[in-house]
Amino acid sequence: MQRFASASRVFTLARRSYATPPSPSALVLIEHKDDKIVPASLNAITAARKLGGTVTGLVVGEEASTKAVVEGAQKLGLDALLHRTSPALAHALAEPLAPVLAALVKSGNYTHLAAAHSAQGKNIFPRVAGILGVQQISDVMAIESPDTFVRPIYAGNAIATVKSSDSIKIFTVRSASWDAAVSGEEQAAWVSEELTKSERPDLGSAQAVVSGGRGVKSKESFDSIIFPLADALGAAVGASRAAVDSGYADNSQQVGQTGKVVAPSLYVAVGISGALQHLAGMKDSKTIVAINKDPDAPIFQVADHGLVADLFEAVPELTKKVEEAKK
Ligand SMILES: Cc1cc2nc3c(=O)[nH]c(=O)nc-3n(C[C@H](O)[C@H](O)[C@H](O)COP(=O)(O)OP(=O)(O)OC[C@H]3O[C@@H](n4cnc5c(N)ncnc54)[C@H](O)[C@@H]3O)c2cc1C
């Protein structure tokens, strides 16, 4: 049996003293994993603030696993924070969560419902839109006004500006297009050694990404060639779909149209041809470096720095040089 109502709690923070919230009034689903807020949700909060009205955060899940998340979310300067707990919501499955979200949006008179354009957002939000009988707006890059949104189409080759006449706007946010919402306390905590010690940065929010493609040829060489360069650069590890399909890398590492969209300061593409669907996920990176033995590979058309070379020689050499330069 689901115990949504009895387990529901509401925290009201800061400036919320209205009987009826002013329009626009946005509800943002705060995604979490391993007791932490998923970084892409912080970008979604920034996007919701752009609407110009109130922003309410929503944390759902099991009581125990959401405690730290709620504490983190309370520091984000939201107008209000809803915390809904139920064992049924433990894994954020779309089936139990979508009706809860739809009911919350209606009962709270929210004008907007936002989340990251993550696997979770993409899974849950179309279902909420279906329940509410409105259209979903996916992968929002910019907001021109509370009803006008900018989003990519045709794998990022065209940018569409769409105006929604729905009473409730449901949208997912492209994290690479928005800054993360931060709290002062979190900025101070960011320097902690825990973060720099061992774990690689999160692909979606990393400042540098090293990605390997089919040219890397095996999982063994992916591990022994791509990971050391990423570690030397303090970078996250990405992959092309061909590398993922061949089992060299995990699904969660795929960059591209059907993977993650990233825009780090540095993107290093190793043994990746540069297919349109891959470019859709990384072409907004500030500096793109490509290493490929084929001088005609399309990746060189978007690369700021290109090296025509055998990756099996060039990448270990580059890794060594980066390590030496750090000394
Ligand atoms: C609907 C749809 C969605 C898709 N979504 C995605 C997506 O999200 N992300 C994605 O990446 N792809 C996606 N694809 C697949 C995409 O079209 C390409 O097939 C894929 O990106 C190719 O991956 P790749 O560059 O690693 O492999 P390849 O195209 O095979 O390129 C391998 C490259 O490695 C180079 N190389 C080989 N050996 C060496 C060596 N020793 N040294 C240096 N270079 C070497 C080759 O010159 C070549 O350029 C999608 C396709 C479709 C149809």
Image: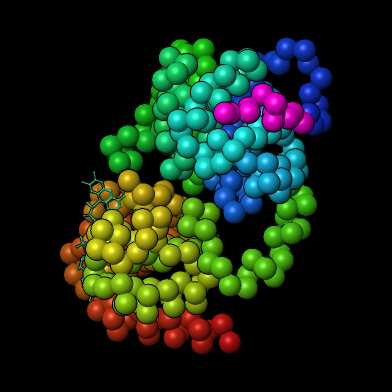
Residue 156, quarter of the rendered image: top left
**Which is nearer the eye, 291 or 195?**
195
Q: Is residue 197 left or right of residue 279?
A: right
Residue 297 is situated, as x and y percent measured from the top left of the image, at 20, 63
- State the residue in front, 245 or 258: 245
Residue pictured at 57% horizontal, 19% vertical = 103
Q: Position of residue 294 (x, y in %)?
A: 19, 70
Position of 203 compared to 215: left or right? right
Asked whether residue 85 appears in the rendered view, the answer is yes
* Residue 9 belongs to the span the image colors magenta: yes
Q: Residue 121 at what x, y percent from top left?
A: 47, 37
**Boundaries of the magenta span:** 1-11
What residue do we see at 48% from left, 64% from top? Answer: 236
Residue at point 58%, 28% (across, down)? 2
* Image quarter for ligand 1: bottom left
Q: Quadrant of the N terminus?
A: top right
Q: Is 289 displayed left or right of 113 in the figure?
A: left
Point out the image quarter for the C terminus: bottom right
Above or below 262: residue 14: above
219 or 215: nearer the viewer = 219
Give the color scheme: rainbow, by chain, secondary structure or one colour: rainbow
Q: Is residue 254 magenta?
A: no
Asked whether residue 52 is in view, the answer is no
162 relative to 120, above or below:
above
Question: x and y percent of residue 7 in the render?
Answer: 69, 30
Q: How many marks?
A: 0
Residue 240 found in image quarter: bottom left
The residue at the point 51 percent across, 87 percent down is 324
